Image (tube, grey):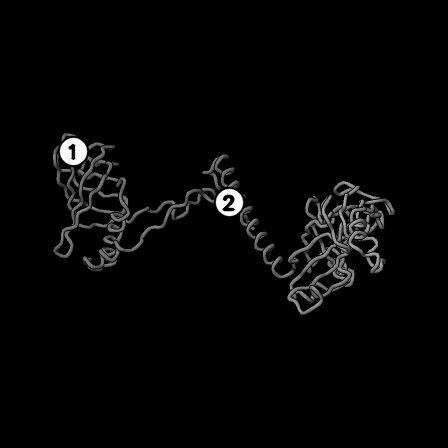
Amino acid sequence: MNTAVNLNVVHESEAQRQHARVKIPARLRYLTKQRERVEARTLDLSAGGFSFIADHQAVQVGDYHKGRLQFRLDSLDLGLDIEFQVRSVDVDNGRVGCQFHNLKPRDTATLRYLISAHLGGELVSVGDLLSTLQRENFTKPRKNGASGSGMGVFGRLKAVSFSLAIFLVGLAAFGFIFKSIYGLYFVTHAQSGLVNVPSLQVTMPREGTVQSLVGPEGTVDKGAPIAAFSATMLEMLKGHLSDEQLSPANVEALFGKQMKGTLTSPCNCKVARQLVADGQFASKGEVIFELVPQDTQATVLASFPYRNFAQARPGTPVSFWVAGEDQPRVGKIVSSSLHEGGLASDIRVVIQPEEPLTSSLAGQPVEVVIDRGPSLDWLLDKALAAGI
């Protein structure tokens, strides 16, 4: 089989005329370079140009003129303002070939309609002409070729940057929507939470005044004195005196005598709060200090709405963020109960942290989150179960 290419073959579309020329009667009026008004009869017409007979006018190739083509249609005169350039001159018969310049789209559509109607043997009517002009007869030209050869380096860089920016904005919007939906369906937030450390209370043994021996948030060993108190001898002997000993003189004498004592720490503790100020009178049994044991591991107390009963079950892993820390922690719910032990609208849970919490964080607010979505461990378990 001969596959040689014949380079001398010319395709039909390369040799045929670009525009069909028809003989449509029209009159041409234009001004010469000497500002003389000239009127001539056209020989033929196409969408790209026309020809006319120059009787005695001096016409040269390359001359540029502005004029008007006048058509007679259905007892109606149709005029088109044109700009044309002389492309050929036949001196023997006076034929001048011209090419249109800056022809408006509406004028081009009008010429094509007149030519098509003439070739088809149809009658040209005003209504059909107006209908043709009302249509969109042209498409918008492409800005660049298919290969993008018309775009420079900076243009391409700008286009790529703009596309990348749009992609990043879309990706950010998708991420935000995905995170919102994920948080709505798979994440449960606690209403409130705090670091909880079991506290001990030191009460006043007698009525009297108190003087602290430990500074604010100070630490004290077990058995060490925390505060000194002073009480009247009458208060100390109350309940041990007979009626004969409660004479006015004896009572006055006992009331004037003071007895001092000390309050000791029941553990290696830190003073969390002093509820009675130094020198202030306190009744018997009134709480003076709240102590936090130093060797006790802190837990987290959190409150969840009752509608999240299924999520806030013992054994559920949680993550929590202690105020003042930079990284979240993880833990597990060890117990749950109704708030205040009755019918309530929220559930109180106790969370045991995986890493010990220092008792110095007691009372710090905590953000607690239960994430029920698929995690990496969950995906690994599923993959191993499927035998992947």
Mark 2 lies on residue: 5
Q: Which residue lies furthest to the bottom in this view?
A: 343
Image position, residue 56 (x, y; %): 12, 35
Question: Observer-nearest residue: 164 or 355?
Answer: 355
Q: Nearer the viewer, mark 2 or mark 1?
A: 1
Q: Is residue 39 above or below residue 316?
A: above
Which residue sits at x=73%, y=52%? 195
Residue at 18 percent of width and 36 percent of height: 92
Query: Compared to 380, does 63 lie above or below?
Result: above
Left/right of residue 84 with respect to residue 57 in the rendered view: right
Spot occupied by residue 238 in the image (x, y as percentages of width and height)? 82, 56
Q: What residue type is labelled 1?
A: Thr
Q: Which residue is drawn at 60% across and 59% down?
A: 184
Quarter the C terminus occupies: bottom right
State the SS at label 1. loop
Near mark 2 (Cα within 10 A), the count class, few <14, some 14-19 or many ≥20, is few
Q: In the depicted view, which residue is nearer to us: 31 or 225?
A: 225
Count of number-bearing discs: 2
The percent coordinates of residue 275 (x first, y second) are 72, 49
Return the residue nearer the eye: 75 or 187.
187
* Outermost top residue: 34
**Label 1 packing within 10 angstroms: few (<14), some (14-19), many (20+):** some
Whichever of callouts 2 and 1 sits on the residue coming sooner in the sequence is 2
The answer to whether one can see residue 291 in this image is: no
| Along the viewing direction, whichever of 130 and 388 lies nearer the viewer | 388
Local secondary structure at mark 2: loop
Q: Which residue lies under the disc numbered 1?
A: 32
- Identified by mark 2, the residue type is Val
Residue 150 placement (x, y as % from top left)? 45, 38
